[in-house]
Image (cartoon, helix red, strand yellow):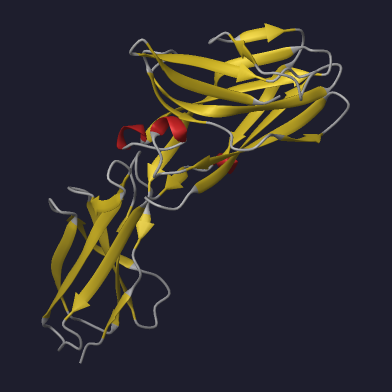
Amino acid sequence: MRIRATVAAASGALALSVLVAPAAQAAGPDFPVPLKDAQKGDTKITKAVVNGGKDIVVGTTAKKRFTVAVTATDAKGVVGGGGFLWHGRKFDEQNLSGLLNPTADEKCKKLSATSATCTVTITVNPKASWDKNGLANHMAGGGWKLFAAAGGKDDDYVIRTAYKTGIHLKRAAKLTVNASPEPVRKGKSITVSGALTRANWDTGRYAGYTQQPVRLQFKKKGASAYTTLKTVKSDAKGTLKTTVKASADGTFRYVFAGTSTTPAVTSAGDAIDVR
């Protein structure tokens, strides 16, 4: 069962349609289905997992591949299933603001005589337009839903326009740290600078993530864990800068907890030599 949503310009407006290859005619022609939940017979979707249950993190250039696994049951057996992600308030022409379609046909694993898990792969291209599996900044966060469908060998089917919600696509982040001067005399000031940046899907570049709390941590030489010293807020360019007193040899790092649109990230450590 191949499933795909399409958006086309029609008289200056967006026209949305969903095409599904009939379950009993996998090689047959696609046909449009209503843009709402639908049910025929006893086919049921029992589970759907997007990206293994993890957030989907996308940068500015590299394509991101993830899977959608749909598990379904039917008294006569399951012949296919899958889905795609969509973004917007409602699944209609006026409210749709993003689509991520499968980029390969599904592969189904038979679980029993009446159930199977069908998995599709979706490839996100951050450099493409949003209707070509691309992204824009307004799509970051948890506004994504899974359109899921499954079909039985007896031509039964089930369609759920928002079977799973709260799926997060996040703008990849980077975090740096630099402690100076080095070496430094004990009791003198150390300046710990850095930068918090994240992917800008509109421009295709990384830009400063501003006004965000970032923890400065220190691990004394020989210690097994870091200790938080203070919280520093990124400035209007995403820059981080603070000072601490030199006390002992060790390593500094910055830690960002993440937000609904941006994942958590930890900088590499920067060692300091105190004399």
Of 238 and 131, which appears nearest the observer? Answer: 131
Residue 97: image location, x then y, percent: 38, 24
Q: Quadrant of residue 4?
A: top right
- Kindly identify the residue that appears in the image at 15 percent across and 54 percent down: 237
Is 256 above or below relative to 145? below
Asked if residue 107 lies left or right of residue 165, the reply is: right
Q: Is residue 132 visible?
A: yes
Asked if residue 274 lies left or right of residue 84, the reply is: left
Q: Residue furthest front?
A: 11
- Kindly identify the residue that appears in the image at 79 percent across and 12 percent down: 155
Residue 233: image location, x then y, percent: 17, 53
Residue 180: image location, x then y, percent: 17, 79
Quarter of the image for the N terminus: give it.
top right
- Kindly identify the residue that appears in the image at 20 percent across and 92 percent down: 275
Is 254 above or below relative to 14? below
Q: Is residue 91 visible?
A: no
Residue 266: image location, x then y, percent: 36, 61
Of 231 and 10, which appears nearest the observer? Answer: 10
- Kindly identify the residue that appears in the image at 50 percent across and 47 percent down: 64
Is 24 above or below relative to 111? above
